[in-house]
Image (spheres, rainbow, N blue to C red):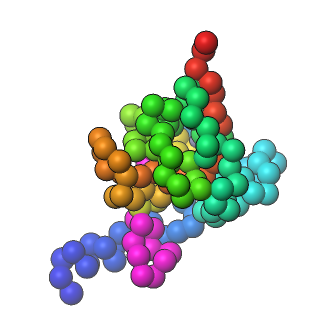
Amino acid sequence: MNRRHFLAMTTAALYPLPTFADDRFQITRTRQEWQDRLTTTQFNVMREHGTEPAFSSPLDKLFKPGTYQCRGCDLPLYSSKAKFDSGTGWPSFYESLPDAIGTRPDRTLLFLVRTECHCRRCGSHLGHIFDDGPPPTGKRHCLNGVSLVFRPAPA
Ligand SMILES: [Zn+2]
């Protein structure tokens, strides 16, 4: 086993999906508290790492100026300036706002290691980051619309 494989396995063991140790985050709620404030779909995506159906989110085709906040804790996560139409059916951005998200390797698909992203303040699952995005970053943050709340920019 080479060093890279060893590190990959160690990381996987440290951060098993789908559960986080909630004390890693500034804002923590019990499972019951999350269930009380979220719909079933929102809970499934945000707290259980589910994925909303493609083309189900009204935010996918929204391109007005504003900010996308975390539904779990209202932290501003993404700007409309970084949003683009990826054609995937999920809201897509080429970058997050500074210090807004956390990432970790997601090995739940055996054939593919993906980069999972979540709100850095409450740990709510947002989506995954891929390397096929547009300039200037080349990244595609493929997000679940249910994890986000859009706040229009002041007119
Ligand atoms: Zn949050």
Query: In percent of the image, x 44 and y 74: which residue is there?
Result: 107
Decide whether residue 86 is among the magenta residues. Answer: no
- Magenta segment, which residues? 100-114
- Residue 149 placement: quadrant: top right
Using the rendered image of the protein, determine whether residue 92 is visible from the camera's viewpoint: yes
Query: In percent of the image, x 60 and y 14: which residue is there?
Result: 154
Decide whether residue 105 is among the magenta residues. Answer: yes
Q: Which quadrant, please, contains the N terminus?
A: bottom left
Query: In percent of the image, x 25 and y 79: which residue is there?
Result: 5
Q: Farthest top residue?
A: 155
Instruction: Residue 27: give x, y in percent of width and height.
Output: 59, 41
77 or 135, which is in the foreground? 135
114 or 13, which is in the foreground? 114
Instruction: Residue 67: give x, y in percent of width and height.
Output: 55, 29
Q: Farthest bottom residue?
A: 1
Q: Is residue 107 left or right of residue 74?
A: left
- Using the image, determine if residue 105 lies above or below residue 68: below
Instruction: Residue 128: give x, y in percent of width and height.
Output: 47, 58
Using the rendered image of the protein, determine whether residue 146 is visible from the camera's viewpoint: no
Query: In percent of the image, x 61 and y 12: which residue is there?
Result: 155
Image quadrant of ligand 1 equals top right
